[in-house]
Amino acid sequence: MRIRWRDRSKVERVEWQSRFMLRVVNWLFFLAWSGSGLAGTLRHDSTAYALGIALGVVNVAQCLVGDRHARNALDQYLGRGRVPVAVTVTAGALGVAALGLIAALAVTDSVRDGLITMPLLFAPMPFACAYALTVPVRAFVRQAGVGVVVGVAATAVVRPSVAGLVVVGMLLALCAGLALVCFRCSAWNLSVMWESERAREVEARLAVAEERLRFGRDLHDVMGRNLAVVALKSELAVQLARRGRTEDAVAQMTEVQRIAQESQKEVRAVVRGYREADLGAELAGAQGVLGAAGIECAVTGSAAGLPGEVQSALGWVVREATTNVLRHGDATSCRVELTNGADGVTLTVENDGAGGAGAGDARGRASRACGNDWPRWAAHWRRA
């Protein structure tokens, strides 16, 4: 399913941009290095043209295979899959073929003005850039060092020259460094952003779980003892009834009824306290939680003098809006404004995240004033 750009989170936008650059960079290197190095420098003979065309075809194939290789390598780096062995082998074989054609061009003096170094700089790049994401940095550096030594040794066999050996060694080392800088650093930054995004989601889920545990503990404290007493007195009433002591059994069951009614009242009190939210505390808590998450939060207005039911409803609006900003809004700043006018109270929560807009009435269910991915929440209470 295709997702519109404005509906993507910041991390998803950064990943899309990174993937786009990974797909484009090989083509840019091909045009800037190999293409410019061959264009207009081939000698005018059939051998030079044949080798040049063959190298161009191999370079294009490197870019096509390197596109898939880079995408799979980034997925593996982010822990979403593995690079197929066939793709790695194909990309490596094309790189070796390109180096072989470059060696043939050098041996036959098919390129003028010494610009053979430009295609040489490009040849290892499509494979090395993607491969840098699939192995640890130290392993890549060691393997790149071996590749440089092999390349220099091959150059010594094809055309022994001190200057040529130095140039080849420097170019191959430069390719390895560019692969680490261009691809590995970008992938690392992207992985750090995804880790931060997952940490934020985990923090929000832990906050919800902690609140559920608190409610569970409160309910257990209230009901645990009473249920134990009810069980004991019910068992006692059964035993008394079996022995024919009906009046004592009735007395025990009357006590069970009283305890059950008290338990109902205590449960209602616990649930009422759980559902009621203090607006002042929620405003301060929202500012603290959003600030800890790196979202600048400004709160204006005071909850002093508002009726308890109004504070409770608006407090739930603030709590739900804060949760949505943390989990869905993708915001960097948030503003909470409480306006107490002559005709009523208006609470507005705004952020710079993605989405639409919504409104609700605090006299109804507070959740009606909230919705996922909405950058603006509003609730209004009118005075009677």
Image: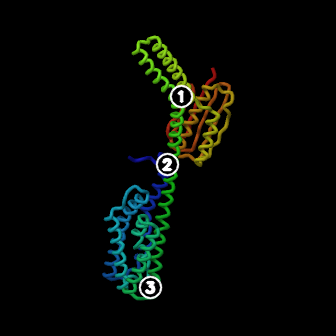
| Marks 1 and 3, the one that precedes in the sequence | 3
From the top left corner, tell me how far across and down residue 147 is, in percent. Answer: 41, 76
Label 2 Cα crowd, 10 Å radius (few <14 / some 14-19 / many 20+):
some
Numbered disc 2: secondary structure: loop
Q: In the image as oriented, which residue stretches furthest toward the top? A: 247
From the top left corner, tell me how far across and down residue 132 is, in percent. Answer: 43, 67
| Marks 2 and 3, the one that precedes in the sequence | 2
| Cα distance in 3D space between marks 1 and 2 | 44 Å
Of residue 321 and residue 1, the one placed in the foreground of this image is 321
Give the amino acid type for the residue marked by disc 2 in the picture. Ser
Residue 276 vertical placement versus 115 (above, below) = above
- For image coordinates 51% across by 31% down, the residue present is 220
From where the camera sits, is residue 137 visible? yes
Of residue 150 and residue 202, the one placed in the foreground of this image is 202
Numbered disc 1: secondary structure: helix
Would you identify the image quadrant in which residue 97 lies?
A: bottom left
Would you identify the image quadrant in which residue 172 lies?
A: bottom left
From the top left corner, tell me how far across and down residue 199 is, in percent. Answer: 51, 49
Residue with the mark numbered 1? 222
Q: Which mark is residue 164?
A: 3
- For image coordinates 67% across by 35% down, the residue present is 301
From the top left corner, tell me how far across and down residue 126 is, in percent. Answer: 40, 68
Of residue 211 and residue 97, the one placed in the foreground of this image is 211
Q: Residue 9 carries which label?
A: 2
Give the amino acid type for the residue marked by disc 1 in the picture. Val
Label 3 Cα crowd, 10 Å radius (few <14 / some 14-19 / many 20+):
some
| Left or right: 311 in relation to 152 | right
- For image coordinates 51% across by 39% down, the residue present is 208
